[in-house]
Amino acid sequence: MKQLLRYLKGYGRESVIAPLFKMLEACFELVVPIVTARIIDIGIKNGNTPYIWRQCAILVAFGVIGLVCSLTAQFFAAKASMGFGTNLRKDLYRHINGLSYTELDKIGTPTLVTRITSDVNQVQTGVNLFLRLFLRSPFIVIGAVVMALSISFRMTLIFFAAVPLIALSIFVIVRLTIPIYKKVQNTLDKVVLLTRENYTGARVVRAFSRQEDEKKDFADTNARLMKTQLGAGWISALMNPMTYVLVNLAIITILLLGGREVMIGSLTQGEVIALVNYMNQILLALIALANLIITVTKAWASAIRVNEVFAEKTTMTEGTKEREEASNAHPSAVSFSHVTFFYEGAREPSLWDLSFTVQKGQTIGIIGGTGSGKSTLVNLIPRFYDAQEGQVSVNDMPVKAYTYEGLRSRIGIVPQKSVLFTGTIRDNMRWSDPTATDEQIWEALEIAQAKEFVEQKAGQLDEMSYTGGRNFSGGQRQRLCIARALVGKPDILILDDSASALDFATDAALRRALREKTRDMTTFLVSQRVATVRFADQILVLEDGRLTGMGSHEKLRKNCPVYREICQSQLSKEVEA
């Protein structure tokens, strides 16, 4: 938690004013029993009605001033905690975006969502309550004991006995609940995971009629979450009964001993009432302190989880080179030199000792079976991952030497999963170039074979894309994603199996348009279709992460058994198409 307090920077004034005004409110509250005692001992005893009214007016004034102090404290505490939460959320989001795919794969999306939402909110609530009560409650307890001491030393001994017992009961309960609250947040991660999987995979779940199974899994996880929360709730619920029992025993003792003191004239009736009021103030202050401790305990558990994300450092270091044009003397666009790559926790490498060079303007096909390492290979070019061995270079410069923006601004990427964002088609097209004109967008749409269906939309470029682009078909989404990559006119275009939803005619038209209208662009076509890669300048054939062949379609059919087998399996469908 201490590590996160730096996010209160800029809210120092609010962080001081809030507890100070709460202490000021407490000061007026501590004076109330004394005024009440005077009303009893002087006003009521002597039948002095004007005195009683004057003292009642003082009590009303104290109440109004206390309310103003409380509202002021609440305002500044809320301002400080909201600012704290905003700063923390922004920094956490920036930190997560700075992590490489390796760390993101290891942590997992559901837990990151929980930590940046639920956990940050929990910490924010803890800060709010802490600023309001961390001085007020102890001040009330100590102040009430001091005020009781000014009335009667002997009676104050009851306070000295009751307060430690109440504090001990609170400490024991809090100590038992801390690990449970952390377990609650971990179980909440699993609930978020199931929710996310079921919403994103709703079509698959329904296609296989697995709704009931998924409902059962969710119900079981939700029940486990409820059981954990109830466990913490049962323990926390013991706090109020225990504290009330101890305080009421103390009040009974005060009344018994106080009554004797009144009989012998050592105390007045008003002073006994004041002592009872002070004990009640201690009870309320300790209950508030207990609620504060519970909230801070939850916040502490959440802060640990947030700090775990901050502690996760990226394994990749950003370079310093910005975008540079390739030298004519060294026209190679991409080169791999003895590259070997492992995924985190994998026993075997996904890529083994890859070496090849791609010249500027070439079209490179990458083909291989499922799990052969095709996507892994192209993910190393924009440096989504770093190879453990060997070197990947772009324009004869290692990718590690570039800044992320400098490298990725020259690369257009269309991933396997087509992702469109909420907004218009124009908004989505401008992701690669925010200044792109409508003419540039239409040109990219034409190359991507998307112009025709976009023109048929009522809004054309202003047509809305719903979440995930669900109002477009799979093939339309793929073509829009290809157009989005082309808008920025990248030096290198990577199509990672991004034409899988296209029919053969549209796929052929797309490849023809890419050859004719992007001659200076180096293009990587990742596919399992021979028809997609057969006209590439060079074809890379992968099997189990190894490069088993490189060359033209005809050369590989003669010399590469793996490629020949792929061609034979698709012969009637594609090779002769």
Image (cartoon, grey):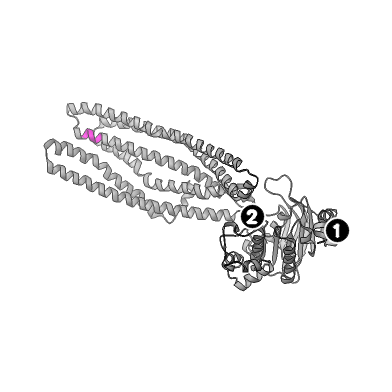
Residue 324 visible within the image = no
Labels 2 and 1: the sequence-earlier one: 2
Q: Nearer the viewer, residue 404 or 190?
A: 190
Residue 557's disc is: 1
Q: Hey, which residue is sitting farthest right in the picture?
A: 558
Q: Hey, which residue is sitting farthest bottom in the picture?
A: 439
- Taking the spot 25% from the left edge, 46% from the top edge, the residue there is 63
Element under label 2? loop
Q: From the viewer's perspective, is the residue at label 2 or at label 1 nearer?
A: 1
Left or right of 134 on screen, residue 423: right
Left or right of 250 on screen, residue 429: right
Q: Is 446 within the magenta?
A: no
Q: Position of residue 426 (x, y in %)?
A: 58, 67
- Taking the spot 26% from the left edge, 49% from the top edge, the residue there is 65
Toward which corner of the image does residue 326 lie, by quadrant? bottom right
Q: Position of residue 291 (x, y in %)?
A: 40, 40
Above or below residue 553? Residue 131 is: above
Q: Main secondary structure of the magenta part?
A: helix
Q: Position of residue 136 (x, y in %)?
A: 34, 44
Q: Callout 2, which amino acid?
A: Met
Left or right of 224 on screen, residue 441: right
Question: Magenta span covers which residues?
Answer: 271-275
Q: Nearer the viewer, residue 382 or 204?
A: 204
- Taking the spot 69% from the left edge, 49% from the top edge, the residue there is 343
Q: Which residue is mark 2?
A: 316
Element under label 1? helix
Residue 81's disc is: none
Q: Is 274 within the magenta?
A: yes
